[in-house]
Every structure is written in structure tokens, then in C-alpha cells.
């Protein structure tokens, strides 16, 4: 298992959930929900510097059938902006069912959908990151797809 803090990112149209791992890559915890705006990339890169992240793990929304969804291109573009805006490694990982899992976990803890909006994206980011950490530990290789920075950025 590689060492170093990683950030997990759940990209949404309105909000972006952010989670982080411990430096040993064992457990993911929520960080914050960033409102989706022109400053979202900058805020996440500032968080990456603050937590001394070695990698950003961005959830890639894929349909259960394995096909792209309307949100797939948006997540890929967001990940590309992160890769182009920093020298931190960016990876895309399959995030099927994470938002549903996050909502289910919050309901099980007694929270309603209405009072969970501010944290559901963070919980989804935790689930994305924890799956990536668990995969790396079991497969002995980094998870997902590496996002290469665009030349000249």
C-alpha cells in the first residue's frame, strides 16, 4: 500500500463532496461539501495542499450496465481540470451506487433526506475513497484510471 493522504471527490452538478484518508491509506473521513461554482477546482486544490494530498480520487458515475451516464463527461472534465491545475496525481474510480449507499447510511442513522443534503456528498466521497483504498490494499495496485495532465497546462 502506498503511503500518503488522498482526497476522495464526489462530483455533482450542485455540490462536490470531499473526503480524506489518513496518511497510511487505511480509512476515509469526511472533509467538507464545496458548492459547485467556478471556484470549486481552486477550493479542492487548496484542500489538497492543506492536507498534503498525494492523490485525488474522483468518482466516475457509470450506469449499472457499464455505460456512460449524463454525469460521466462532467466528472471526467472535472478530473481533467484538477489534473491540469496541479502536479498531484488524479485518478478516476467507478462510483456506481455510492450516492444511494450514502443516502441509505444516512437514513439508517436517523437523518432525513432534507437534513442530509449538506453531508450526503461528503458521505459519497468517503465511500468512493474507502472503496479505492480497499481495492489498492487487496489488489496491490493503484485503483482506477490515471488522468494525464493536458500538455501545456
Image (cartoon, rainbow, N blue to C red):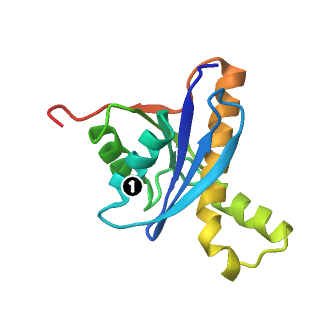
Determine crowd level at label 1: few under 14, some 14-19, many 20+ residues with C-alpha closer than 10 A: some
Q: Which quadrant is home to the C terminus?
A: top left
Question: Disc count in the image?
Answer: 1
Task: Say which quarter of the image contains residue 79.
Answer: top left
Front position in the image: 139 or 107: 107
142 w.r.t. 16: above or below:
above
Q: Which residue is drawn at 56% across and 27% down?
A: 4
Front position in the image: 33 or 96: 33
Local secondary structure at mark 1: helix
107 w.r.t. 31: above or below:
below
Q: Which quadrant is home to the N terminus?
A: top right
40 w.r.t. 55: above or below:
below
Q: Percent position (x, y) of residue 24?
A: 66, 26
87 w.r.t. 100: above or below:
above
Q: Residue at x 45, y 48 (%)?
A: 47
Visible residue check, residue 64 = no
Q: Which residue is drawn at 52% across and 33% down?
A: 144
User: Which residue of the protein is positioned furthest toward the bottom in this rendering?
Assistant: 114
Visible residue check, residue 33 = yes
75 to the left or right of 123? left
Q: Percent position (x, y) of residue 118?
A: 60, 71
Q: Residue at x 53, y 42 (%)?
A: 7
125 to the left or right of 44? right
Q: Percent position (x, y) of residue 53?
A: 49, 35
Front position in the image: 151 or 72: 151
Q: Percent position (x, y) of residue 124?
A: 63, 56
Q: Mark 1 points at which residue?
A: 43
92 to the left or right of 123? left
User: Which residue of the protein is positioned furthest toward the front in this rendering?
Assistant: 50
Amino acid at each position: 500500500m502506498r503511503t500518503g493522504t488522498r482526497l476522495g471527490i464526489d462530483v455533482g452538478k450542485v455540490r462536490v463532496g470531499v473526503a480524506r484518508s489518513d496518511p497510511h491509506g487505511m480509512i476515509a473521513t469526511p472533509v467538507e461539501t464545496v458548492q459547485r461554482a467556478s471556484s470549486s477546482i481552486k477550493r479542492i486544490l487548496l484542500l489538497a495542499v492543506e492536507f498534503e494530498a498525494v492523490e485525488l480520487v474522483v468518482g466516475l458515475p457509470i450506469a449499472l450496465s457499464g455505460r456512460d451516464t449524463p454525469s460521466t463527461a462532467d466528472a471526467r472534465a472535472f478530473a481533467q481540470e484538477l489534473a491540469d491545475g496541479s502536479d498531484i496525481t488524479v485518478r478516476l474510480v467507478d462510483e456506481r451506487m455510492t450516492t444511494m449507499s450514502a443516502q441509505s447510511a444516512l437514513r439508517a442513522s436517523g437523518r432525513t433526506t432534507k437534513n442530509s443534503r449538506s453531508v450526503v456528498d461528503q458521505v459519497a466521497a468517503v465511500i468512493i475513497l474507502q472503496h479505492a483504498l480497499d481495492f489498492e490494499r487487496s489488489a496491490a495496485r493503484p485503483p482506477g484510471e490515471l488522468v494525464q495532465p493536458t500538455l501545456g497546462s
